[in-house]
Image: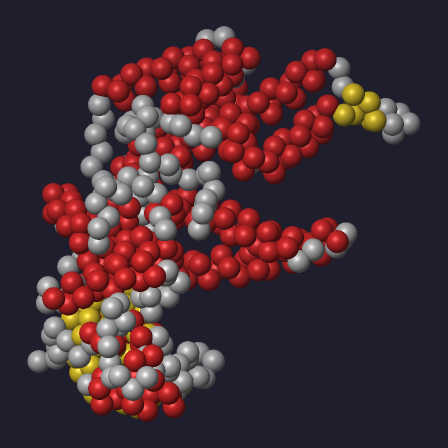
Amino acid sequence: MSIIQTAHLYHRFSDGTQGLDDVCLAFEEGEFTVIAGANGSGKTTLLRHFNGLLFPESGLVSVCGESVKKNPTAARQQVGMVFQDADSQIIGETVYDDAAFGPENLLLDRPQIHARVTRALADVNLTGYEDKSPHQLSGGEKRRLAIAGVLAMAPRVLVMDEPFSNLDYPATRMVLDQILNFHKQGHTIIITTHDLEKVIAHAQRLVVMENGRVVEDGIPEKVIGGIERYGVRPPCSIQLGRGILPWEN
Amino acid sequence: MGELTTIGFKPGRSPLHRLDPRTKQVLLVGLSVASLQGGITFLSISSLLLLYLFTAAKLRLGRLVYEIRYFLLFLLFIFVLRTVTFNDQWLPAIASGNLLVEALLVCWRLLLVVFMGLLLMSTTRIADIRAALIWLMKPLPLVNEKTAATMVGLVVRFLPLILYQAGEIGDALRARGIERRKNPLTRLVKFSIPLFRRVFLRADELVETMQARCYNEHRTVPELSFTLRDSFAAVIGVGLCLTVLLR
């Protein structure tokens, strides 16, 4: 059984724009998928359906076999979403409080919350920052805190919307290393990006979207060839004819 | 985001940080009510105590005064309103000494209440404020204490963000020469429209991010504990209030 499945998913915004148009996708447990596309192609809209923040106009989205529309809370527990703007995701007044926000919503008891928060902060190298105000953190640290806030809810799937946007080189490397670690630990990873350079060498699957439709879906080596026609810049190594190479080397 | 604003929770381990939020909220209400009746002795002792608490909590008083500069202008307006009178020929005249002292006391009282509120916000986590409100409002009939506490918590949470947005928009307007527009109404419109737009957008984002992390009213609340320190603070607070009642 796929961990996330969409069947003939359509979504139309209130202004009449077609956000998603007949999207049929299935994601397997432990898979590392990159969803690419130009701005406005429907990447973020699709991610919001996985987390129950948007519901389909028609079609079905299911997480672990259960309809997201029928039980959005279960979907949100299984699918942790990291938003593009880390500032908007930060809710707590200290790093610890922010990481504890999700487990508190799950009505866990205090020792369990403490254990999860400690583990999540350690996973993203933010141990020792517990009493700091999140707004004093750097951009990379805020992004890592946003990831920790999601990890503390122990989701099976980690969904990230443009996780490298507005990050400098060291912060991008650190976030990428952590994403790869989570994948090694068995998490299912789904990342949206229009900048394939940083992550494509590690992905097992590349989905390309245009105007709300899935136009390409397959292993990166097969899909990446003609990707420029969908408004996505191919990685430098592809342009130089050297195939897909890791960005961090 | 470099510096948000000085208003809002600042982590720390000062005596006030370690007080039970219920004690702090009850003391805030009690002392605020007492302030409105308090004379010079009460106001002086309270002001000195506040000064100590601000210093102990390592809060930047100067910066806080700057943050509430528009409220200080409002106080000045009240002071002028209470002290300037008009004679038979409609010429302004300064009121007598007693009225001047009375006006000064009114402004002092209001300022004290605002500073006590700021001190509570700076030394208490919103989650703790919410937990204390739930506990305090539980006996009240016809009040959903969880919803009410969440609403108060969100207002307290949002205030520094709104002030930050206002600062950003003000800077952006100044960078494009808003000072050259002499009409205050135009300046107000140019400032408020983007501010409201940004605040509503930010509120929508906040709701989405809270939903994404399974937010609901029934969540684990922080553990509250009333200790000896709280009893000590309560005794000081009641003692201060008594100086008003027994004068």
A246 relative to B100, above or below: below
B55 relative to A79, above or below: above
Query: Is residue B191 shown left or right of residue A98?
Result: right
Residue A168: x percent and y percent? Answer: 37, 60
Q: Nearer the viewer, residue B54 or A53?
A: B54
Residue B52: x percent and y percent? Answer: 42, 19
Q: Nearer the viewer, residue A164 or B235?
A: A164
Residue B199: x percent and y percent? Answer: 49, 57
Residue at left offset 19%, top offset 71%:
A189
Residue at left offset 30%, top offset 28%:
B13
Q: Quadrant of residue B8?
A: top left
The reply to whether residue A165 is visible in this rendering is yes
B27 relative to A225, above or below: above
Quarter of the image for the N terminus of chain A: give it.
bottom left
Residue at left offset 46%, top offset 44%:
B3
Q: Quadrant of residue A39?
A: bottom left
Q: Residue furthest right?
A: B89
The reply to whether residue B217 is visible in this rendering is no
Residue A19: x percent and y percent? Answer: 38, 82
